[in-house]
Image (cartoon, helix red, strand yellow):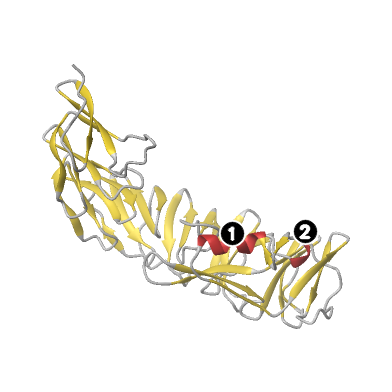
Amino acid sequence: MKFSNGNRKVVGGLSVVSLIIILCFNVYASDRSFKTIEKNGKLAIFDPKTNRLTGYLFDTVYESPYYKPKAHNGTNLITKFPYQGLILVKKDGKFAYLNEKFREVVAYGTYDSITPMNYYGYSTVKKGGKWGIINKHCQLVAPIRYDLISQEPSVCFENAFKSFLVKINDKFRILNKDAKPVLQLEFDSVEILDEHFYLAHAGKKLYLINDNCSVLSDYYTSVSSIYEGFIVKKDNKTGIVDHHNRTLIPFIYDSIYAPRFDPCYFATKNDACGVIDLKGKTLIPFEYEQILESWENTNNEDKHLIVQKNQKFGTISFHNCPNNFLK
């Protein structure tokens, strides 16, 4: 991601990027000791009073946009320039880290690629097709041997995850926020779920792992992410657990489906369909062959669903009995 004051459209004193960030997050903070100006396709670094501090040398001068962890379901996007006393730049296609006096701390060409530093002060680096991790002192803390290092986000932009997903010799591992392999497990594949969780596959076993590298479970046969937690299956029965693996909906259903934007769940039990809420209360009884979402645009706030009973279709609301069944 390229950040430079000289090549961004500004609207009412805010860049388009900043406007988007503010829309995505409740809190947006920025701390810039320097700014950049572009001339003839190159960037120079200036102080806040617009005194030029470097020549027009750089292809890109990177800010460090990262997510400051908050309580669950919340992050603050912070943008630092410089961050931890370092400035990541690219010149003539080569990356370097400079200090605040613009001296090379990581020399140009030391690595083929460097990513902006995350909240905990780590950057991923690439050399000769392999990846490693350096800390805020520019020391290697994870050797350059990995085929992949990812901090793929679950929300907008980047650096939302504090842990690292790595791949080596066709196997995946998860490193903690300090780039240490505290979780002594290898996986065949790993999916990144919403809200900073991993679903890791090892043989026929599934592991649900959080961003602190703690295994929440290794006994579910399927896991899908929802806002409140996860729809999970074990022993051929389906329930819902929260983000700490505490049971919200007991494992008494054959299947559970979370419709979009609705605080309810379609469930099946004993080959019959009904609707429940997150407390397990039955909103629509289990007496239908199918229940389908209705996308009808109406001023009526009482949303209707399409249901099937006795091989006939009709509509039903959460507050009224079935109506309009076809004859």
Q: Please name the residue shown 28% across and 50% down the image.
A: 263
Q: Please name the residue shown 55% across and 74% down the image.
A: 121
| Residue of label 2 | 93
Q: Pick whichever, 280 or 116, lies toward us.
A: 280
> How many residues crowd around disc 2 within 10 Å: few (fewer than 14), some, or many (20 or more)?
few
Along the polypeptide, which appears first: circle 1 or circle 2?
A: 1
Q: Please name the residue shown 43% across and 51% down the image.
A: 171
Q: In terms of image quadrants, where is residue 272?
A: top left
Position of 248 relative to 180 (above/below): above
Give how far across and how far down residue 181 sits, in percent.
42, 66
Q: In terms of image quadrants, where is residue 194?
A: bottom left
Give how far across and how far down residue 90 sits, in percent.
75, 64
Farthest top residue in view:
327
Disc 2 is placed on an element classified as loop
Farthest front residue in view:
299
Q: Amino acid at mark 1?
A: Ile
- Rendered-image quadrant of the N terminus: bottom right
Q: Pick whichever, 85 or 108, lies toward us.
A: 85
Farthest right residue in view:
40
Q: Pick whichever, 136 or 291, lies toward us.
A: 291
| Residue of label 1 | 20
Give how far across and how far down residue 256 sits, in percent.
23, 42
> How many residues crowd around disc 1 within 10 Å: few (fewer than 14), some, or many (20 or more)?
few
Disc 1 is placed on an element classified as helix
Q: Pick whichever, 238 or 143, lies toward us.
A: 238
